[in-house]
Amino acid sequence: MTDRRSLVHHPDFRRLWTGDALGQLGAQLTFLALPVYAVTHLAATEWQMGLLTAAESAAFLVIGLPAGAWVDRMRKRRTLIVADLVRAAVLAVVVVAAFTDHASMPLLYACALVISAATVFFDVAHQSYVPGLVGLDHIVEGNSKLQATASVAMVAAPALGGALLRVVTAPVLVLGTVVTYLLSALAVGRIRQVEELPRREDRRPLRTEIAEGLAFVVRQPLLRRIVACTGLGNFAGGVAGALSALYILRHLGLDAATLGLVLSAGAVGGLVGAVLTEPLSRWVGEARIIPVSIALGVPAMALTPLAAPLASAGVPPVVTLVLGGVLFNLAVVVYNVAQVSFRQRLCPPALLGRMNASVRFIVWGTLPLGGLLGGALGASIGVVPTLWVAAGIEALSVLPVLLSPLMRLRELPVAEPAQTS
């Protein structure tokens, strides 16, 4: 009989949830501290910020595909712990370099690359771990709770970090991140479920296993459209993300504390989205919610470049940025919970790691390319025009799902399991 109790009563999920919360808190503090440090202490240019953005996600493009096959051969709990420890160690190097006046942009690039590689393994293992840990009937609830945790971290961490930056330096915030990653590893290490690894004699050549993961993604028509939408959206996010700190700190003239406040307030939308995903899916339909939710993100993203001209008209830029952030994060979180849950239900358990890695290779592999384009365009045509380019790409990203059967469906179709032999 299916256990319908909330996952709050699931001990191992609580441990994963705790570890995820600590990791998300640290990641959000780093997301605030490193760009602020690069802009205010290392005088980073538009192109250098583009390189930093690219380094932070480059591993998804470089090792994203084989990582899935490797994760399917590993114990996912151990993979999560090692990834946390690696990220803590690398950020400790950043702290030491900053305190000894040896920090530089090349060092930040190198550290970002290593963190990126650890994050690839963490994210692929994390998404592949949830179904086996909680069961297929609890996937949506599990993903919603983890998305809610991420959203809470997005709310709390920037506000906390922005306030702390008034009295401490950015490296001190990074040191706090080291601690949260260590605590995250400790929490995940307490999970008691024993994982069954595939038999070594059943393994096939790595190339064959990678090809199976890609083939599963490519052969599923709805999944292809979702991947195209997410990939283009992340490309737009990479373009805009490369210049966000420069735009807010230099172009709009806001300080680091206000930047933290803007990020925190905007993330409230993500928290609301995580809470509303299940009731919205029942009301709109679990298929239709995918295109509807992401379409709402297009006008929200346009509010970022509009903050500059609206400021000249008397509208405080903080108001415009917060409104855009709330709407955009709400839309993206609802979209992500819906489409990730669909992917997990659709995919046979033996293929989960490779399927998630294949999807991540495509959709996250566009981030470093977007970062490089954002840095190059920012240096050549300016920050605000580049943000408008990003908003235009975001609008194009919606078309694959908006012009698909998803708009006509309430329930997502049940696909036949992929053949793995």
Image: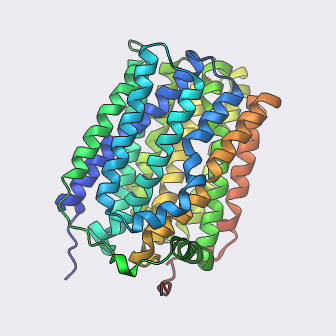
User: What's the residue at 45%, 20% (across, down)?
Assistant: 97
On the rendered structure, is 312 left or right of 56? right
Horizontal and vertical percent position of residue 319: 57, 29
Visible residue check, residue 338: no
How is this picture coloured? Answer: rainbow
Visible residue check, residue 347: yes
On the rendered structure, is 350 left or right of 253? left
Residue 210 position by quadrant? bottom right
Horizontal and vertical percent position of residue 285: 49, 71
- Considering only vertical position in the picture, is 316 above or below 372? above
Residue 90 position by quadrant? top left
On the rendered structure, is 299 left or right of 285? right
User: What's the residue at 30%, 36% (across, down)?
Assistant: 180
Horizontal and vertical percent position of residue 92: 38, 28
Spot the residue most to the right: 381
User: What's the residue at 68%, 47% (across, down)?
Assistant: 369
User: Viewer-proximal residue, 176 or 392?
Assistant: 176
Horizontal and vertical percent position of residue 21: 31, 44
